[in-house]
Amino acid sequence: MRILFDMGVYDLRNKGNVALLQVAVERIRARWRDASFAVITSAPNLLRLYCPAAFPISPDQQFDWRAHVGFIDRIVRRLPRPLLRAALELRDALWHRVPALGAWLTRRAAQPAPTLIIFEHKNPAAEHNRAHIDLVNGFDLVVGTGSQYLSDACCDNALRVLDRLEAAHRLGIPTALVGQGLGPFDDPELRARVQAVLPLVDLICVRDDASAALLRATPGMDPARICFTGDDAIEMTWRARKPVRGNLIGVNMRVAHYTQVHTASIETLRAVLRVATRQHKTHLLAIPISHSIHELDARAIRQLCAGIKMETTRASQFETPDDIIKKVGRCRVVITGAFHPAVFALAQGIPAIGLVKSPMYIGKFAGLVEQFGAGCQMVHLDDAHLEAKLTDAFEIAWNARAEVRAQLLECAERQIESGRRAYQRIFDLVAAREKEQSSGA
């Protein structure tokens, strides 16, 4: 059994995406223990850190990680994972602080320096793109792991994922998309490919009702192939829940083109956070999720929290999702401009406040509000009364009664069960396809 995982975004710098990959691999590996797992990634050493059972495949399909191994990589691949993490931290520090040494290391090692991976999509028709067929050929299952890369925000990579799914369909390979948030699809080419390819996918698991409605409106889509699961990372978060609530305020800020968040809101947000820490005699705890070059949460958080008491904690861009979930577990409230800090809070019974502006993020957090109820709130950053609205939302979250925690955990458990049922459908469709092929032979 050979299984290919396509993450849509390949640098493994966004820990929300990493969490979704880890859960997908864990759930499928629990069923097929002897299967081989391949993951499309531009960061093979990070894959070994986060998913050591999986083998890397280059997203540009022109690079063989097995054939191109520098002498540094030979050493790195033998390191225990704690030492590998330390080596990666040292490597990145050298790249950014000693450019000449970083350039030398880049020439000597197989893995390139951290960069934003953008692929130009030149040929949307999979039947004319032999590279995609060659990549998926020989696999028994192709899984697109969760996130919201199937949207205008990641248009080029979304087109690549759709091409691979279509190639797999043409080869008779079962396909599934799991933990998906979808849209918006304003780009005409992307919208056309979505309408052409998604109806071919055997099973699409969505994390919110809006994504399900978008799929149901797609011409040719079979509603029986759509199922709601919530976010796949809810399960690993729920397992880490603590019996006693924390006393910190978790903070994330995401400044990116798709969030439409700019620095103009930061002064107002900072004023609310400063008052909150003083009144409740607590500190802020930074919860960066993405270290991708086009997001860089840590930098935005530092700007937001300047001059406010911060909890001292060891920060590493190579933290695992489990590390971040444990940090969130120390919080009483999480205020976030990114999606997964809210998921990592809510599934542990911790109230969360989403800071939203763009239609994409309003939709993402609206899904969480619908799924988790009163424990999740949204505050619009372009609201004329932002300071008062955020202050009120914070006080409601901080003073939430025990019943709110119980409700959040119950909501998480229901979504976990929905996810497990959905993955059982993946196992069933693979078994059915194998039966068809054996009977046909």
Image: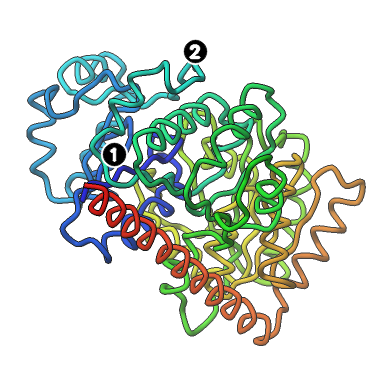
Which residue is located at x 72 percent, y 33 percent? 262
Residue 111, image x, y percentages: 24, 26
Quote the CA–CA distance across marks 2 and 1: 35 Å
Horizontal side, residue 268 vs residue 247: left or right:
right
Callout 2 crowding tier (Cα within 10 Å): few <14, some 14–19, many ≥20:
few
The amino acid type of the residue labelled 1 equals Glu
Above or below residue 268? Residue 404 is: below
Which residue is located at x 36 percent, y 43 percent? 142
Above or below residue 57? Residue 365 is: below
Callout 1 crowding tier (Cα within 10 Å): few <14, some 14–19, many ≥20:
some
Colour scheme employed for the rendering of this structure: rainbow
The amino acid type of the residue labelled 2 equals Lys
Dividing the picture into quadrants, the one containing residue 229 is bottom right
Q: In this rendering, which labeled residue sits more in front, label 2 or label 1?
A: 2
Of residues 226 and 45, the one drawn nearer to the viewer in this rendering:
226
Which residue is located at x 40 percent, y 30 percent? 167
Question: For residue 122, which numbered disc appears in the image?
Answer: 2
Asked if the residue under mark 1 is in contact with the one under mark 2, i.e. CB atoms within 8 Å, the reply is: no
The reply to whether residue 161 is visible in this rendering is yes
In the displayed orientation, state which residue is furthest to the right.
384
Of residues 196 and 360, the one drawn nearer to the viewer in this rendering:
196
Element on which disc 1 rests: helix
Residue 164, image x, y percentages: 41, 31
Q: Which residue is mark 1?
A: 89
Residue 162, image x, y percentages: 49, 32
Residue 309, image x, y percentages: 59, 57
